[in-house]
Image: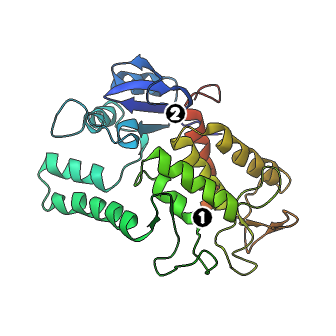
């Protein structure tokens, strides 16, 4: 077993948020690099660094390079032989490019804004939920609802908790498989493949739920996948049958499934509800 110690950064400090709430924070250390060195001294081979400022669309200190990216550089210097995971995106890439004089860094920042604006303009319906197909006009059309839209929230492109709550409510009505703890099929109006329960989406939706503080909901999905996988030689299925929850799909989700499972576990543990990292 490989453990991934987590360092959650907010405004340059090591913190933990209760139930993912930005207003309920405990500060554990002001020196993330020192924390990294302590984990390495304990034998850690990997570090998982979380940029909570990015999750909450915050900046700190008024500096050119966001303070958490400065702390990441310090962690890398403190742990030069350790593998480090760090979630980032176009905005973080633009900030690093700006700081280090990379050419055309502005286009990455502009691209991030275009993606967000495009989703809001073309896919956001009535300020309530994201539809899955730009051309679809009626809810009974194929792919009008697509559970992959949860990634817009899970990846921090859209960060409004009210929109996420209404999006979740609508998708639970149209794409949630009936039954205790069951997850989601991918799209409405699909064939047997699309109408099966997509395990990968269950796990990615769990991560999105954690981002918005709904850890209990996420835990229910992850426990469901864990229980089913335990019955299948600890392999994560591609699909569960809609009616029987039988193991289905072409192959086990050996890469995608395991990766999404680890990310969902990491997101659940980050808010302290699972007993720490």
> Which residue lies under the disc numbered 2?
20
**Direction from residue 238 to residue 23 in the image, left or right:** left
- Closer-to-camera residue (276/244): 244
Question: In the figure, 61 relative to 124: above or below?
Answer: above
Let me know if residue 189 appears in the view: yes
Let me know if residue 253 appears in the view: no
> Which residue lies under the disc numbered 1?
147
| Mark 1 or mark 2, earlier in chain | 2
- Closer-to-camera residue (67/17): 17
Question: Is the residue marked by circle 1 packed among few (<14), some (14-19), or many (20+) residues within 10 Å?
Answer: many
**C-alpha gap between disc 1 and disc 2:** 23 Å
Q: In the image, which disc is placed on residue 11?
A: none
- For the residue labelled by badge 1, is the local secondary structure a helix, a strand or a loop? helix
- Using the rendered view, name the quadrant where residue 63 is placed: top left
Residue at x-position 15% and y-position 45%: 99
Question: In the figure, 123 relative to 44: above or below?
Answer: below
Q: Position of residue 68 (x, y in %)?
A: 30, 35
The figure's colour scheme reads: rainbow
Question: Is the residue marked by circle 2 packed among few (<14), some (14-19), or many (20+) residues within 10 Å?
Answer: many
């Amino acid at each position: 077993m490989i453990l991934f110690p987590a360092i959650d950064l907010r405004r340059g400090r090591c913190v933990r948020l209760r139930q993912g709430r930005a207003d309920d924070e405990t500060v554990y250390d002001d020196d993330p690099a020192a924390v990294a060195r302590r984990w390495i001294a304990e034998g850690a081979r990997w570090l998982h660094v979380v940029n909570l400022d990015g999750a909450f669309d915050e900046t700190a200190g008024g500096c050119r390079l966001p303070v958490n990216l400065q702390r990441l550089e310090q962690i890398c210097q403190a742990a030069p032989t350790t593998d480090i995971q760090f979630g980032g995106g176009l905005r973080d890439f633009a900030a690093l490019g700006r700081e280090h004089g990379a050419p055309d860094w502005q286009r990455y920042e502009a691209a991030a804004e275009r993606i967000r604006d495009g989703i809001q303009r073309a896919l956001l319906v009535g300020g309530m939920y994201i539809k899955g197909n730009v051309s679809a006009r009626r809810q009974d059309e194929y792919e009008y609802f697509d559970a992959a839209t949860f990634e817009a929230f899970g990846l921090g492109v859209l960060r409004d908790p009210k929109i996420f709550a209404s999006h979740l409510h609508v998708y639970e009505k149209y794409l949630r498989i009936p039954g205790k703890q069951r997850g989601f099929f991918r799209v409405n109006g699909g064939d047997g493949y699309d109408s099966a329960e997509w395990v990968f989406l269950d796990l990615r939706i769990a991560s999105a739920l954690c981002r918005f503080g709904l850890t209990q909901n996420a835990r229910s999905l992850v426990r469901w996948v864990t229980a089913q996988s335990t019955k299948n030689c600890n392999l994560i299925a591609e699909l569960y049958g809609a009616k029987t929850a039988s193991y289905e799909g072409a192959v086990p989700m050996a890469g995608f499934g395991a990766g999404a499972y680890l990310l969902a576990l990491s997101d659940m543990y980050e808010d302290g509800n699972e007993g720490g990292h």
